[in-house]
Every structure is written in structure tokens, then in C-alpha cells.
Amino acid sequence: MLLVLFTTVVGVLGFWDIYAGPRADPQPHHYLHVGTIFGWMGLLLAQISLLVRGEWASHRRLGLAVLFAGPLLAASAALLTVHSARSALASGEEDFLIVQNVLGTLWLALILFMAFALKKRRKLHGALLSSTLILFLGPALFFTLIAFAPPFRIEGPETFYRFETAVRTGLGIILLIVLLLFAKDRRNNWPYLFAAASYLLGEVSKAMLVRLDLIDSLTRAVATPSELAAFIIALAIMLALLVCTVLPATPRMGLREVASREARVDAGGPPNNRTA
């Protein structure tokens, strides 16, 4: 729960300039991004609260909301990644987060899939879902640092190096958090390390692409589809993956019937399965 609250606070600070800064000009994709991320964090917070109170049936019924929230979360990340690449090409400037945006989107989809593929291991399932916050925390810390911490503020071309400094400082904070979480439960909290690994892999990949002079090629490749196409494709793929893992194997069972069955099981009653 502390990780959710911390990420929420950092997220608010990270988006502050877009909505309340002196040059605030939020665009539709900003509203989509903020809505999906904070909606996801609200869902995680609600699920944790239900577990603390021992309301297992309500927890499982609310969990079906992931069929809506999960695909929307992944799709909005894909849309933002394409939008960022297209904006960089249009302005003639480098998209300094292109590698992390691509890896972050792929990592998010992978973690969501793994969370429900391993849902029978409850603690691991919970850690995987909570580890998605680590993926949000990186960009949120980056924008918070350059907006509110004077040593990281951009004051002209001569201070562009501070972008990299902010990225590495945020990565250091994230590594400290995930190591503390892993030390608390080494058997089940490895997903936090796995989520943080996307940042390390991103830094290594970026260094290699810069050395090979392929950053521009990657940016152009990512910018090839439209934002809408990226959103629809990611939404469809993530929905298909989650349907395969979230819902029971019984093919004729609808969402309402799944929730009803789980409620009966939690109450100690029979599942009342129907046979074909």
C-alpha cells in the first residue's frame, strides 16, 4: 500500500507542470495517460484494502475489472510511445526516452500476462501486479526531478545533460526501493527486481543503439503506425492475453457467472458447475 501511495504522490508531482504549471497545456493523450495510470493505482489500492479486510469474494469480483483496465493501460502506454516518437521527428529533436518507452510498454504487457498466468500463487500474483508501479515510477520521478529539483532543471541547451542525470538519479531511487522490497520476501518479491530490470536493460540498449547510430532508426520505426493504430493493436493483444489467463478454462462461462461462482466458493458453498 505504501508503494501505491508513494507512486501516486510522485505521479501528481510529475504531471504538475502539464496541468498546473506556467505553460500548462494538457492534450487529450495526457488525460488518457493520467486517467489510466491513476485508475490502475486506484484499482490496486481497492484490491489491497479488500484483502486486508478479508473480503475475498469482493476481491475476486473486482479483479475482473482487469479485463478492462489492463488492456487500456497497455494501449495508452503504446499510444504515448508512438506519440513521443512522432513528436520528436516533427520537432527535429531526439526522443531521449524512446528506448525506455518501448521497453516499458513491452515490460508492462509481459508483467500483466505473468500476473494472471501465475494467479494461483497469491503472493507472487500480488507482487507482479504491484510491480507495475515500478514501471510508472521511473517517468514520474524523471519529470518530478526536472520540474521541482533545481539541480535537474533544464535552463537551456547547455543544461540538456541534466536529462541524463535525472534519469540516473531516478533509477538509483528505484533500485533502492526494489532491493528493500526484495529483502522483505525473496521468494515472492522478485517481480520488483524484474520490473526494475527494464530500466537497466533500457540503459544498456540505449548505449548500444547510440554507439551504432540507430536511435534515429528506432524512433522512425516506432513512429510508423498512427497513435490510434498503436492503441487499437495493443488493446486487442492485451485483451486476448488477459482473457486467456484471467477467466477460468470453462469456455461457456460468462463474466457474471464467473463472479457468482467465486462468491459461492468463498462463502463455503458448492461451485454449482453446469455440465454440457
Image (cartoon, grey):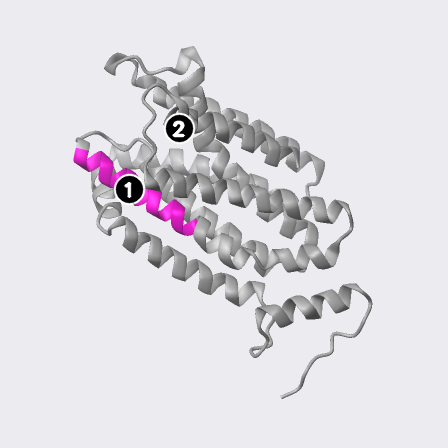
Q: Is residue 124 left or right of residue 99?
A: right
Q: What kind of element bears circle 2? A: helix
Q: Is residue 249 above or below residue 74?
A: below
Q: Amino acid at mark 1?
A: His
Q: Position of residue 58 (x, y in %)?
A: 70, 56
Q: Is residue 220 located in the magenta-colored stretch of the structure?
A: no
Q: What kind of element bears circle 1? A: helix
Q: Is residue 125 left or right of residue 52?
A: left
The residue lying toward the viewer, choosing from 272 and 162, is 272
Residues in magenta, as a range: 74-90
Where is residue 41, by image quadrant?
top right
Q: Which secondary structure type mostly characterizes the magenta part of the structure?
A: helix
Q: Position of residue 213 (x, y in %)?
A: 21, 35
Name the residue located 63 percent from the left edge and 56 percent from the top edge: 62
First-in-chain label (2 vs 1): 2
Give residue 83's mark. 1
Q: Is residue 194 visible?
A: no
Label 2 with label 1: CB-CB less than 8 Å: no
Q: Position of residue 83 (x, y in %)?
A: 28, 42
The residue lying toward the viewer, choosing from 153 and 99, is 153
Q: Position of residue 113 (x, y in %)?
A: 52, 56
CA gap, disc 2 and disc 1: 18 Å
The residue lying toward the viewer, choosing from 100 and 137, is 137
Q: Is residue 21 left or right of residue 58?
A: left
Q: Amino acid at mark 2?
A: Tyr
